[in-house]
Image (tube, rainbow, N blue to C red):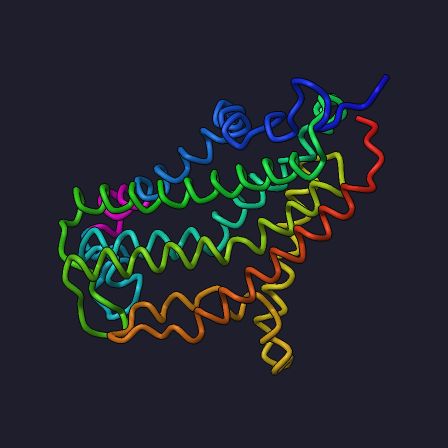
C-alpha cells in the first residue's frame, strides 16, 4: 500500500485531526462533564457548609471570620469568595484535573486500541499530539474559568458583591477587582502547565490512562513535599512549588510582577521540555494498540 503524502490527491495532513474535532470528542466524555461539575460543586459545598454547618453562627470556625487573611475574608463578597475558591482549588483539585485531561489524552486512545487506527488514517504523529495537548489545556482552562465564574455568582448570591478586599491590606474598586482576579486566574493556569506537561509525557510513555494521571500527581506531591523541607535551602528555588503561590503578589497595592514572571518562565520552560521529550519519544514509539 502506497503511503499517503501531501502530494496524494485529496489528502491533507492538516485536515486529518483538527483541534475542533478533538474538542467535540472530549466534550462528550463523561469525565469532562464531571470535571466541569466539580468546578460548580466546590463553591456550592463551601457555601452550604458555611451557611448550614454547626459553626455557621460563629463565622464558620475561621472561614469568613473577618480576620485579615485570605480565608478570613472569604465571605466579605463575591470577589473574595472566588479568590478563596481559587486558593482551595489550586492546591490539589486543579492539579488532578490538569493531570487527568493531559494524562488521559494519548494513553486513553492506546487503552481503547484506537491509537493505531488514528495514525493509520493517517494522522501525523505530531499533529495528533498537538491536538491532544491543545484540547487538554483548553479543557483545563475551561474548568478553571467555570470555577471562578461559579464561585463569583454563588458568592454574590450568598455574600453580596462588595469589591475585593486584599488580605495584604486595602481594597479595590470593581474594575480593579476583576483585573486582580483575572491575573490570579491566568497565573494559576500557567502554573498548571507543570502537572499538565508531566501528565502529557506520562501519557506517551504508558498505555494506562490511570497510571499516567497517577504518576504525574504523585510526582507533583513528592516535589511539593521536598519544597516544604527548609533544610534544602537554595535548592528549593529550582522546585515548582516555590512559585505556585506567587499570585499573591497580584493582591498588593502595586502588583509584584517579578516573582510571578519567574514562575511564568519556569512553568513555560518546564512544559516545553516535557512536551519536547514526549514528542521525541512518540516519534519513535512502536504503536501496537
Residue 175: x and y, percent? 17, 58
Q: Mostly what secondary structure, the magenta segment?
A: helix
Counting every numbered tag in the picture gives: 0
- Which quadrant does the N terminus fall into? top right
Residue 285 in which image quadrant:
top right
Residue 253: x and y, percent? 24, 74
- Which quadrant does the C terminus fall into? top right
Identify the magenta region: 46-56
Residue 178: x and y, percent? 23, 55
**Residue 111 seen in the current view:** no
For residue 224, side relative to residue 42 (left or right): right
For residue 45, side relative to residue 277 (left or right): left
Position of residue 272 relative to residue 264, above or below, is above
For residue 55, side relative to residue 258 (left or right): left
For residue 209, side relative to residue 243 (left or right): right
Q: Which residue is drawn at 69% across and 18% down?
A: 9
Magenta segment includes 8: no
Between 162 and 27, the residue placed more toward the observer is 27
Q: Which residue is drawn at 17% across and 65% down?
A: 172
Q: Which residue is drawn at 59% across and 36% down?
A: 131
Magenta segment includes 52: yes
Position of residue 105 relative to residue 94, above or below, is above
Q: Residue at x 50, y 58 (%)?
A: 191
**Residue 174 seen in the current view:** yes
Residue 232: x and y, percent? 64, 79
Amino acid at each position: 500500500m502506497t503511503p499517503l503524502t501531501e502530494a496524494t490527491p485529496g489528502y491533507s495532513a492538516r485536515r486529518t485531526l483538527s483541534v475542533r474535532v478533538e474538542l467535540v470528542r472530549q466534550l462528550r466524555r463523561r469525565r469532562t462533564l464531571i470535571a466541569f461539575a466539580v468546578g460548580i460543586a466546590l463553591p456550592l459545598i463551601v457555601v452550604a457548609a458555611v451557611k448550614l454547618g454547626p459553626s455557621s453562627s460563629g463565622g464558620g470556625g475561621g472561614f469568613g471570620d473577618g480576620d485579615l487573611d485570605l480565608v478570613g475574608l472569604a465571605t466579605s463578597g463575591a470577589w473574595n469568595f472566588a479568590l478563596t475558591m481559587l486558593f482551595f482549588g489550586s492546591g490539589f483539585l486543579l492539579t488532578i484535573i490538569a493531570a487527568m485531561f493531559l494524562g488521559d489524552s494519548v494513553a486513553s486512545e492506546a487503552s481503547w486500541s484506537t491509537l493505531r487506527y488514528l495514525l493509520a488514517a493517517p494522522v501525523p504523529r505530531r499533529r495528533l499530539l498537538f491536538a491532544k495537548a491543545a484540547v487538554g489545556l483548553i479543557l483545563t482552562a475551561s474548568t478553571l474559568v467555570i470555577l471562578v465564574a461559579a464561585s463569583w455568582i454563588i458568592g454574590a448570591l450568598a455574600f453580596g458583591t462588595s469589591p475585593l478586599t486584599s488580605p495584604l491590606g486595602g481594597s479595590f474598586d470593581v474594575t480593579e477587582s476583576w483585573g486582580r482576579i483575572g491575573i490570579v486566574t491566568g497565573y494559576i493556569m500557567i502554573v498548571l502547565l507543570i502537572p499538565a506537561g508531566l501528565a502529557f509525557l506520562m501519557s506517551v510513555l504508558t498505555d494506562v490512562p490511570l497510571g499516567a494521571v497517577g504518576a504525574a500527581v504523585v510526582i507533583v506531591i513528592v516535589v511539593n513535599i521536598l519544597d516544604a523541607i527548609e533544610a534544602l535551602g537554595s535548592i528549593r528555588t529550582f522546585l515548582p512549588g516555590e512559585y505556585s503561590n506567587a499570585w499573591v503578589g497580584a493582591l498588593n497595592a502595586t502588583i509584584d510582577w517579578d516573582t510571578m514572571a519567574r514562575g511564568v518562565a519556569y512553568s513555560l520552560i518546564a512544559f516545553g521540555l516535557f512536551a519536547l521529550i514526549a514528542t521525541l519519544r512518540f516519534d519513535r514509539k512502536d504503536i501496537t494498540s
